[in-house]
């Protein structure tokens, strides 16, 4: 079993472990893993699995989590086997053009946020400001004003003190109020509980590239009510993103081309971090495999450099044992994870019946990864290399294929997902699967702290930095770097203090070139390469990919513009940029240029 770090224990105690009425922790991490494993395994009984086999499945689930090979999304760790019982992380709620619908969605969002879930909304169906309200003869206030109401409500819902309220707000680029939406977060403190993204169409992006006007539509009537110069709107998006980090872009046509159940409707929104596009009233359970634990040592005498490793094999030092990916273990883990997540759909206690109907109808799960940067370091492959991109495709294709194989096996025993007929799988040559989607790349913020690995598919944010989690400040250093520095004899407390100021290894002469090249950090990597990595994983991911495109503080608006256009050209489903220092994020360095 893997040892939990002091930071992992702090996070678990602060957010995940049971507490009594006085706020005292009354559960150990071991008891938490057992509680979750038992609850998820108990769903096996629905399918006629005998008690002895259920307990074996429970042990397998427990060992996988306790060894930190895999962790489910936070609501599962928090709520499984407890009174609340809500296990899904991602929700999208409909917002129709009526007061009843708007406030019904707000009520449902409150229930979801309280249970630890995150909610996404498209406000694109709301009539624009100053439009007629026929029932009262009044004037509409527009979608942005209602977003502010949702934001205030989120502020007072503390999610039981476990998680900060998280929302995604989306508006189509052809909505008449699009400029108000794009610019709203330029004012300090506005929509602090929302990430916002513009749903841009292929037609809009073509208009940007050809410098043309495009039409704005009143969603109430469906009629054209104005025009905008596409490049002017795009420049406003760029300026706001440069100043505040918002809005991101959602490439909505591309997302809907990959909609597995188009017969059920159009995807309008995603979850708060953008990696999970969902239909209205749909949910998804997520989980992530720790890739840092999917490698094994190779005896030096037997080691043969694989094709993707040839150019970087020279970086290997005499003190480092060569590693390779343990595909046998990874395959076993993927299969077990798919079973875990499919069970979680049945074990879940849903906040409202409409969501239960949709989730059990499509049975979407999102298996992803964390520890990608750590895996690359163990394999001696620099993150910002062509070898890393090739390996990203190789690993994610393997995970997707194994996940679908397991979903097919489950369908033979448990049945196809109920909405299979009419789905993209309902034709010759397509797999007969249990789950409409199986793969998603989530950010894994706190999960990666528990697992003591790098988050999601991100590079190391820094070698040494501080992280703010709720009211806790954690100091974090790369354990792989410290191990390497001690093995090679260049570790010292003075060196770590120097690294703490810079975050990066650049310009520190005491550090060997090979280590500098291997331990590359987020701000050492070009925005284009961040996007290349996102695109590489997207090729073999059913849903979408959460990836921060880091920019230094000195980055220009033109840099942001290039990143947004490049992400569209590379086939990404969305993009979020973060220019360091534009807002106080959870990860902090003292000095980033």
Image (tube, grey):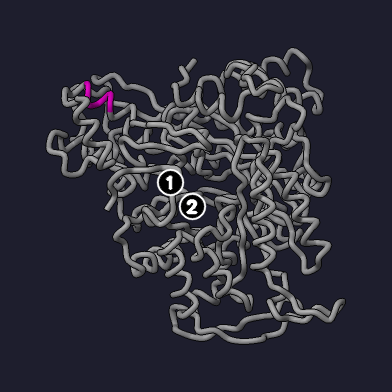
Q: Could you say which quadrant of the image residue 566 lies in? A: bottom left
68 vs 521, nearest the viewer? 521
Q: Give the farthest residue toward the right.
A: 135
Q: Where does the image place residue 88, in percent across and percent down from the top left?
A: 68, 39
Q: Where does the image place residue 39, in percent across and percent down from the top left?
A: 72, 24
Q: Where does the image place residue 505, in percent across and percent down from the top left?
A: 22, 40
The disc, 1 or 2, on the residue closer to the chain's N-terminal end is 1
| Residue drawn at x 47%, y 74% as measured from the top left | 236
Indicate the secondary structure of the residue bearing disc 1.
helix
Count of marks, rendered view: 2
- Please say if 318 is above or below 95: above
Q: Are marks 1 and 2 in contact (CB under 8 Å)?
A: yes
- Examine the residues drawn in magenta and state their main secondary structure: helix
Mark 1 and mark 2: span between their CA atoms? 7 Å
- The residue range painted magenta reads 482-486
- Please say if 325 is above or below 351: above
Indicate the secondary structure of the residue bearing disc 2.
loop
Camera sees residue 132: yes
Classify 10 Å Cα crowding around label 2: few (below 14), some (14-19), many (20 and above). some
227 vs 389, nearest the viewer? 227
- Numbered badge on residue 393: 1
| Residue drawn at x 36%, y 68% as measured from the top left | 557
Q: Give the farthest residue toward the top.
A: 52
Q: Which residue is mark 2?
A: 539
């Amino acid at each position: 079993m893997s040892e939990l770090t002091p930071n992992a224990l702090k996070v678990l105690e602060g957010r995940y472990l049971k507490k009594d009425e006085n706020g005292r922790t009354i559960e150990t991490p071991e008891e938490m893993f057992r509680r979750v494993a038992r609850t998820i395994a108990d769903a096996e009984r629905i399918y006629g699995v005998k008690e002895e086999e259920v307990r074996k499945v429970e042990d397998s689930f427990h060992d996988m989590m306790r060894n930190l090979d895999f962790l489910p999304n936070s609501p599962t760790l928090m709520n499984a086997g407890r009174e609340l019982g809500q296990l899904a992380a991602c929700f999208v709620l409909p917002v129709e053009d009526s007061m009843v619908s708007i406030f019904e969605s707000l009520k449902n969002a409150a229930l979801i946020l309280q249970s630890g879930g995150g909610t996404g909304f498209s406000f694109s169906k709301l009539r624009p400001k100053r439009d007629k309200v026929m029932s009262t003869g009044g004037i509409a206030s527009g979608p942005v004003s209602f977003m502010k109401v949702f934001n205030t409500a989120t502020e007072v819902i503390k999610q039981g003190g476990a998680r900060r309220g998280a929302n995604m707000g989306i508006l189509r680029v052809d909505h008449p109020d699009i400029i108000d939406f794009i610019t709203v977060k330029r004012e300090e403190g506005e929509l602090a509980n929302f990430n916002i993204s513009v749903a841009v169409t292929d037609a809009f992006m073509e208009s940007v590239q050809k410098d043309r006007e495009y039409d704005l539509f009143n969603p109430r009537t469906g009629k054209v009510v104005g025009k905008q110069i596409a490049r002017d709107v795009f420049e406003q998006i760029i300026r706001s993103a440069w100043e505040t980090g918002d809005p991101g872009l959602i490439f909505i046509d591309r997302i809907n081309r990959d909609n597995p159940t188009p017969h059920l409707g159009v995807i309008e929104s995603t979850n708060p971090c953008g990696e999970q596009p969902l239909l209205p009233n749909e949910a998804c359970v997520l989980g992530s495999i720790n890739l840092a634990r999917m490698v094994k040592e190779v005896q030096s005498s037997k080691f043969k450099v694989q094709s993707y490793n040839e150019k970087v094999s020279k970086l290997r030092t005499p003190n480092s044992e060569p590693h390779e990916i343990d595909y046998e273990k990874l395959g076993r883990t993927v299969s077990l994870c798919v079973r875990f997540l499919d069970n979680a759909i049945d074990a879940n206690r849903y906040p409202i019946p409409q969501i239960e109907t949709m989730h059990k109808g499509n049975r979407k799960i999102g298996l992803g990864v964390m520890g990608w940067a750590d895996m690359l370091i163990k394999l001696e492959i620099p993150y910002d290399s062509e070898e890393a991109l090739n390996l990203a495709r190789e690993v994610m294709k393997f995970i997707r294929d194994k996940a679908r194989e397991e979903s097919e096996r489950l369908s033979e025993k448990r049945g196809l997902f109920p909405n299979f007929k009419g789905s993209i799988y309902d034709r010759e040559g397509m797999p007969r699967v249990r789950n409409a989607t199986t793969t998603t790349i989530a950010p894994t913020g706190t999960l990666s702290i528990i697992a003591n690995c790098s988050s999601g598919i991100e590079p190391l944010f820094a070698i040494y930095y501080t992280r703010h989690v709720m009211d806790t400040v954690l100091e974090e250093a790369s354990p792989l770097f410290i191990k390497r520095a001690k093995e090679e004899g260049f570790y010292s407390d003075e060196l770590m203090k120097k690294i703490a100021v810079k975050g990066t290894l650049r310009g520190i002469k005491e550090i060997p070139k090979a280590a500098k090249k291997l331990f590359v950090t987020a701000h050492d990597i070009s925005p284009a390469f961040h996007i290349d990595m996102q695109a590489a994983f997207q090729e073999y991911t059913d849903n979408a990919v959460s990836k921060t495109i880091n920019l230094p503080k000195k980055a220009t608006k033109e840099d942001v513009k290039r990143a947004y256009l490049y992400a569209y050209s590379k086939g990404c489903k969305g993009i979020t940029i973060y220019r360091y220092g534009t807002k106080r994020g959870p990860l902090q360095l003292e000095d980033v240029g």
